[in-house]
Image: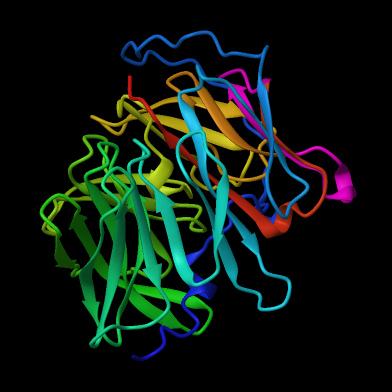
Amino acid sequence: MALLAAIAVVVVTVVNRPADPLAQPTRLTSIPATPSPSPSSSPIPTAGLTSVRLPDTTATIYESPADPIKLTTYLLKDAKSGDWVYYTRDSLTGSFTPFKNMWESMLSPDGRYLAQRGKTYVDGYDSVEITDKVTAQRFEIRTSKEPLSAYVQAWSRDSTRVLVNVGKPSGDTWQSTGFAIVDVIKREATLASLREGSLKDIRYGFDHNDVGVVALALDAQQQTLRFFDADGRRVRSVPNVGGGIADMMFSPSGKRFVTDCPGLGNGNSCVYESATGAEVIRVVTPCYGMATWYDENHLVCWVNRGGGSGHQQVQVIDFDGAAVRTMADVPTGAPDLDMIYTFTRRN
């Protein structure tokens, strides 16, 4: 069995880092818009929260049963090896377990399945290992053939499929060649090789309908959001968007998506209609990293609370840019920590 060498260097992208300060222009203000009505959101719970200390960190998370998102996985950088270690929840409300022998480990949105990727090729193939927590069955599904690797990118919202990013390291970057969709029910993977111009450091996510796939880079401040069908055929493009997290960019209903505003860095979030690609609102936020979604009308992001002390929080932000709830508090060590929140229900 050959080792999947150095993959962790490129497959884990920490999203709580700041944008290039030299690229930060004057901040925008929110602009008026006339978007199509969005699903209403329930009041955000701020009282009676349960606090959970994350093992091996200074971080504390604050949860409510009414939250539409749950922290299902967090990543911690190992001080000795420099590798990122996945700590995955045993259930949607359970404890966290580190998996140092896996490159990736992610719990499904319904809490039933665990998707993991080991550190060696098996019979010349990379694969995804699935554990069914209900039946205790474990099985492997082959994805890419050596020397390509296929790292676990995201779960579908219905918890039946896993999206993997196929490619290989190229220096300090990741050169993607396409993606594969792993069907957990059928126990098979469908590989899609993309004939696209630039796939360097590209990240994939399931689209707003939870069927096709989108591709977007984190660091490109002005780019095109590309939509593909499950077989890898490009079906649509939305030009002139900013950096974003492809696997976390769509709202719970799928009707909206968020990126940094084009040409700007973190702290300037643009919200678009998924169906048309039309920009509907710009929000100036205190975000230190890229924003994702809490519910239809609120974003969530890392916020720097301590100047040079390293104190950071994960906060819920409204469309006026105001913080309305703290989801996590990290007094120290935030640059070596990242968190993966998952929609556990969909509007």
**Left or right side of 227 for 261:** right
**Left or right side of 290 for 167:** left
Which x, y percent locates residue 212? 19, 46
The answer to if 297 sits in the magenta stretch is no
Q: How many marks?
A: 0
User: Which quadrant is home to the C terminus?
Assistant: top left
Q: Quadrant of residue 264?
A: top right
**Left or right side of 160 for 248:** right
Residue drawn 60% across the image and 37% down it: 301
**Left or right side of 229 for 248:** right
| Depicted 272 relative to depicted 226: above or below | above
Question: 103 or 96: which is nearer to us?
Answer: 96
| Depicted 84 relative to depicted 6: above or below | above
Question: 119 or 22: which is nearer to us?
Answer: 119
| Depicted 76 relative to depicted 235: above or below | below
Residue drawn 48% across the image and 55% down it: 218
The answer to if 310 sits in the magenta stretch is yes
Which x, y percent locates residue 226? 27, 51
Read off the magenta span. 304-324
Question: 146 or 27: which is nearer to us?
Answer: 146
Which x, y percent locates residue 118? 40, 73
Which x, y percent locates residue 326? 69, 27
Q: Can I make out residue 141 in this image?
A: yes
Residue drawn 33% across the image and 69% down it: 198
